[in-house]
Image: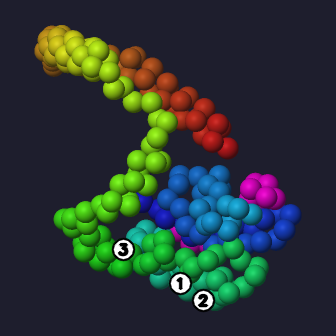
Amino acid sequence: MTIYLYVKTHRKTGLKYLGKTTSLDPYSYHGSGGIWKKHLKEHGIDYDTEIIRECQTNQELSQWGRYYSELWNVVASSDWANQIPETGGGHCGPDAARKISATLKGRKKPPRTNEHKQNLSKSTKGISRPRSAQHQESWIESSKANWANNLERKKKVSELGKSNKGRKHMPEALEKKRQAMIEYWKLKKSQDS
């Protein structure tokens, strides 16, 4: 997987943003920094993208991201929209992110206080929820019917699959599928641009 380290420069204002993406098209990727996104919203999506590195690992990206962040002083300089050095790990480096994740795994959340419960209650007031017994009964019945239909459908699909077992696609059919996928990705790419 290629990780692109890039510099985006706004054409009207000259503000720059150092960032990274794994997007297949790094030129159409706008960037994710808060200040940068706000700037694009205010001044329009009108920027140039320069790919400065193509990295193969997060460690390589982190190394080059730190290098360029320090070289250009992207955090302190008013010419840049970066709030933190670009390391590829968000607000902390990849090692710190792994450590935090490992620490939080299996952790039980503290019990909610009465104040917290009241705030949750207030925030959901006015949201309609099915409460009548009649509605609950109809919901249960429809769920049972859907479940039964799913079982029947699964059996039919399974039987169909058994009858086609071992069959090979014709070369014409495979070529037709391949051409359809090429057209699909061309259309998708043109829509993303």
| Count of numbered circles in the view | 3
Q: Please identify the quadrant where the C terminus is shown.
A: top right
Which residue matches tag 1?
66
Label 3 residue SS: helix
Q: Nearer the viewer, residue 79 or 188?
A: 79
What residue is pinned by disc 2?
70
Q: Are marks 1 and 2 in contact (CB under 8 Å)?
A: yes
Q: Amino acid at mark 2?
A: Glu
Which dot, 1 or 3, sits closer to the camera?
A: 3
Q: Give the quarter of the image for residue 188.
A: top right
Percent of width and height locating residue 107: 21, 67
Does 20 sit left or right of 135 as displayed? right
Look at the numbered disc 1 and give the secondary structure of its residue.
helix
Whether pointer 2 and pointer 3 mark residues with C-beta atoms closer than 8 Å, the reply is no
Q: Amino acid at mark 1?
A: Arg
Residue drawn at x 81%, y 59% is 43
- Relative to 177, say whether 84 is above or below: below
Can you see residue 113? yes
Q: Is residue 164 left or right of residue 28?
A: left
The stretch in magenta equals 40-54
Closest to the observer, 156 or 175: 156
Q: Which mark is residue 46?
A: none
Instruction: Please name the residue that numbered disc 3 is placed on.
Output: 97
Locate residue 113, reporting x and y percent: 32, 63
Q: Is residue 133 above or below residue 123?
A: above
Rendering quarter of residue 50: bottom right
Q: Is residue 168 positioned above or below 5 on the image?
A: above
Q: In this rendered view, identify the residue nearer to me: 128 or 159.
A: 128
Q: Is residue 43 magenta?
A: yes
